[in-house]
Image (spheres, rainbow, N blue to C red):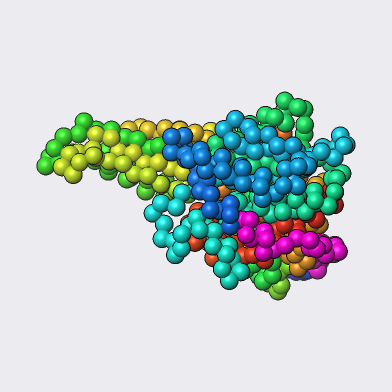
Amino acid sequence: MRTVPLLLGSAAAGAAAVARRVARFRPVEAPVPPADAAGLDADAAAARLAELIRIPTVSSPDPGQVDAAAFSRFRDRLAELYPHTHRVLEREVLDGGALLYRWRSGTDRPPLVLMAHHDVVPVTGQAWTRDPFSGAVEDGWVHGRGAIDDKGSLVAVLEAVESLAAAGHTPVRDVYVSSSNDEEVLGVGAQQAVQVFRDRGITPWAVVDEGGAVVSGVFPGVPGQIAVVGLAEKGLLGVDLVTSDPGGHASSPLPDGAPARLARAILRLDAAPFPARLDEVVLGMVDAAGRHASGLYRALFANARVLRPLLATALARASREANALVRTTVAVTELEGSSARNVLATRARAHLNIRIALGETVQSTVERLRRVVGDPSVEVRVLSGNDPSPVSRTDNEAYAALGAAVRAVYPEAAVAPYLMVQASDARHFAQISDSVYRFMPFDLSRGELDSLHAADERISVAALHRGAVFFRHLIRHL
């Protein structure tokens, strides 16, 4: 009969521990003085961004489809728009057209690297409501391809550098600005920049590239702003599923032909998604953002580590974006069969675009694909792939400086780590630095985020201005 009191006592102790954990689960960010925006002209920055949008630096995996003259005009116009930057900083044009600037400090401290590519994706087949390369500035918005991704970031960086260079500022450590010309096609510009650092024996103090942003309403229970800073990015794997048949006339089809076997393989993959799990980066995001939640949400997030499997499942079901954070995803992006309507397919192919979660590898992912497909007549052919990037540090001076700069511009925002589900140039710099952060210092709405790589890409003049204030504050307080 003593069992019941013991169980009750154990339950009470557990409940008390949970209550204490919730009570301690509060925001930990220290307030910082607001950033100084004096001398940064929002309208002038918007006008300069508009000019750069009008130069269609569209990249392509086929070099023959690239307008090299447009990229040359872009480089020339940068020098004209930012004369103090080009007077004070040393500029290198790497093979192919990537740009690397160095702002010397006169010290041997490890440098800060600010990244923003200047190539953009095509607009073909998209229903824009205005010319995508008009660079129109209307009603407080800058419109056009690259407004956010990633010419907006480049302009925010250069506005900050130009302002400081004009005032005679010298940074306390070297500052590099790296701008590749082929990020959108997974090109080599950033790799060339990394090789420059390697050849010169330079290990960056911190690297800041595109990635997370300041967002609202995306985290359950947290109504305010969250600045999500990418610490890592998922791996990228390209796979073809291929199966073959003798072919023949369509009037005499074969049972279980190549298209049927391919369709079955795709359905098997769709029915057996990779397992959902909460890695340490996403768990860190839950911890940092969850401290700003209220009520039952805060109680849930305070116990996220204990409830890890349950929370992973809940996030997987919450939205497409949340699902991508907690598992390896497989997207079928291309399908190929017969080349004629009355001819049986001799070859059926599907391309899989796969984003590999932290904790998994190209090898483990391919092995699982083969097990799930379970058909030796369907070849799993690996075209390209890279493992997830290393996870950057949050226990150092660099991350603290980044967080302080965020709070100086966005005082109400929670700063939270984030796993980037897309690929970026930053993954190359992760080979030479343990402090690579993927963050665009813009407060972006859901509509603006949805316009990336889509029609009607745009950024508000106010957000662009705040981005420039962020970068200037970061450089000033290195």
Side of 110 where 262 appears, left or right = left
38 inside magenta stretch: yes
Please provide the residue range marked out in magenta. 20-49
Q: What residue lies at 64% left-to-right and 60% top-to-bottom?
A: 46
Q: Quadrant of the N terminus?
A: bottom right
Side of 25 where 258 appears, left or right = left
Q: Is residue 155 above or below residue 224?
A: above
Q: Quadrant of residue 376?
A: top left
Q: Quadrant of residue 413?
A: bottom right
Q: What residue lies at 72% left-to-right and 31% top-to-bottom?
A: 197
Instruction: Provide residue 427's location: percent of width, then percent of height.
Output: 63, 40
Residue 408 appears in view: no
Q: What residue lies at 67% left-to-right and 29% top-to-bottom?
A: 195
Which residue extends farthest top? 199
Q: Is residue 345 above or below residue 475?
A: above
Side of 230 where 350 appears, left or right = left
Q: What residue lies at 31% left-to-right and 35% top-to-bottom?
A: 243
Residue 130 appears in view: yes
Depth check: give the residue in front, 7 or 334: 334
Which residue extends farthest left? 251
Instruction: Provide residue 470's location: percent of width, then percent of height.
Output: 75, 57
Side of 236 where 444 appears, left or right = right
Instruction: Provide residue 112's location: percent of width, then percent of height.
Output: 77, 42
Instruction: Provide residue 42's location: percent of width, then percent of height.
Output: 69, 63
Q: Quadrant of residue 336?
A: top left
Depth check: give the residue in front, 292 or 100: 100
Number of disc labels: 0
186 inside magenta stretch: no
